[in-house]
Amino acid sequence: MNGPAMSDPARGGFVVEARGLTKLYGGTKAVDAIDFGLRAGEIVGLLGPNGAGKTTTILMMLGLTESDGGTLSVLGHDPLRDPLAVKRRVGYLPDSVGFYDHLSGRVNLRYTAKLSGVARGEIDGRIDEALARVRLADVAHKPVGRYSHGMKRRLGLAEVMMKRCDVAILDEPTSGLDPQSTHELLDIIRGLKGDGVSVLLSSHMLNQVQSICDRVLLFNRGRIALQGTVAELSRQILGGGYGIFVEADDIDVPASLAGLPGVREVVAEGAGRFHVIAESDLRSAIAARLVNRGAALRRLSVVEPSLDDIYERYFAIGGAAA
Amino acid sequence: MNAISQSAAPRRKGSPWTGLGTVFLKELADHMSGARMIVLEALVVLTGIGAVYTSLQDIRSASGEAPFLFLLLFTHARDPMPSFVALLGFLVPIMSIGLVFDSVNTEFARRTMSRILAQPIYRDALLFGKFLAGLATIAVALAALWLLIVGAGLLILGIPPSSEEVARGLLFLAVAIAYAGAWLAVALLFSVVFRSPATSALSALGVWMLFSVLWPIVAPFAAQIIAPEDPMAAFLGVPSIAEIQWEQAISRFSPNTLFAESTQAIMHPATRALGPVLQSQVQGAILGSPLPLGQSLLLVWPQITGLVAIAILLFAVAYTLFQRQEIRA
């Protein structure tokens, strides 16, 4: 009943598709007529402030909360009508996941394996494989109460892997983890993608989202304010243009670049450090001019649009109007 | 049985029992291996030994010809030790509450609820599995205790029980399990309603106190107020028939009363009625002679169905509330 081969619902390669999805709590719209899709094999990041509707959307996908309008299809099933079929093929790592502390990691996984209907003969093999992949094989016999925060998250990911699901929904998988654990976790998530699993990931860690997500959905007040790749979002929010970082001594950079064709603006970022906004990649022209005028050029690089900037700018300017 | 079937909502696919066995076995293993169970068992076994020891002493000194000697083992009381049956009436609720008062709310507290419900099961299976596991645990404990008492009786009294005694004993066991079911449902309901296990335990114990201590005191007062005044009874200084009937009706809201009445009729075969009996009704009856098992059962059938009904009703309420609960912790 599992296995990616069985999926591929026709609808244009979307494994999850929402149209006008709405959820009301009391009179307020927690999720307000959102449209989005998740294609097979991609990692999509859900961003947005707390209470923007990310978790509600996730719960609706799992059939754990009823929607109040719109349509939602997960792997070709309606989560409200046929939640068991959906949950059999969707793995979920909840925000701050918990396990039965008195049971060992392996026993915890065995319980969920049985609940998700993994064939009896296959359970132990799958658990071993998943535990090895998240590097918990040597502590699998210890009670989960003795696990660290990061180990519990990894155990949660092992559970998702063990199900051999087609879609993995990860709610804040890295919040509260130290950099080392975060790094490991992100590697494991990349591994999921390598298996052909489509991943939906909600997070506040923007640089991580940027590093592993193919696309981003930015939630705000129950709506999806922006969606697309990071480059697309930066074009929308930061405006077109090329960011170039310049670090040089012994020269007045803004003055020397003032006349250079294509340079729109030069913003000082600190002593001898400048952010140049240009119409195209002007690195060689800038380098030539600065060096010609006798500057000690220390660094010159293209500034990748950062999700952090986009996020901050959106909520500073666009967010208020949305 | 399925979910919040609003007329607008589409019917759900898949069996609500998917995963029931898995949940049941896991919860059962938790109960059986938990320290809580050992404490509860020790409590019951110790009191059981105390009760049976005193009755054994008295039975041995009494003549061996008394009918239903074996049942006396369960029902004999000598001050200050109450009978084993009475002790169970007191202890079974505590065991039931102790087992399940935290069964649903700790799943939220431990943050396992959303993870478990993200597996392909309905909430039905989770709640029902928990209830059944509690019931099975108590059933096993009571059955073990029952066998211990019968075994001790066989060894010490040296006479085998008659088939009717065995049948009545087994029936008593079944009633005790139904009684446990009613209290399990009470505790399970509180574990759904309250997110804090402490609140849930206190509320369940409060209900237990209400029915085991306060209800027997309140029932006669309430009956006095409700029942129409009967000048004849007032003149004689006795409660009127209506008043007694009201009192019984009120006290039968308590599962403790239902259990006490059921065991009364089952374990004392001479019991012919549980309410007031008029002179005209006993005309021709040989007082003190035992009733056949079928007649005893008929006498308390309403009480037994009442116990089962309480369990089902409260479980249904817990189920409805649980279905409507938000999963996000």
Image (cartoon, rainbow, N blue to C red):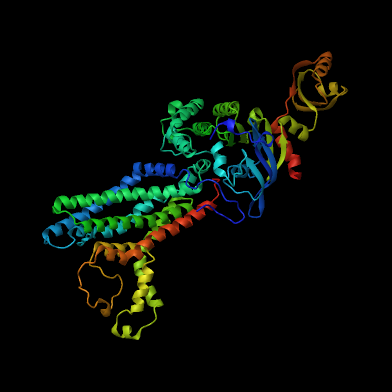
Q: Position of residue A75 (x, y in %)?
A: 61, 38
Q: Position of residue A200 (x, y in %)?
A: 62, 35
Q: Is residue B43 visible?
A: no
Q: Position of residue B85 (x, y in %)?
A: 26, 59
Q: Is residue A179 left or right of residue A52?
A: left
Residue A112, placed above or below residue B269? above
How many marks do you count on the picture? 0
Residue B47, placed above or below residue B294? above
Q: Is residue B170 left or right of residue B200?
A: left
| Residue under the image location 41 percent in, 31 percent down | A142
Residue B237, located in which quarter of the rendered image?
A: bottom left
| Residue under the image location 35 percent in, 58 percent down | B179
Task: Give the camera-side residue of A58 and A268.
Answer: A58
Q: Quadrant of the C terminus of chain A?
A: top right
Residue B203, located in which quarter of the rendered image?
A: bottom left
Q: Is residue B12 visible?
A: yes
Residue B201, placed above or below residue B224? above
Residue A76, placed above or below residue B294? above
Task: Give the camera-side residue of A187 and A249.
Answer: A187
Q: Position of residue A123 (x, y in %)?
A: 45, 32
| Residue under the image location 46 percent in, 43 percent down | B19
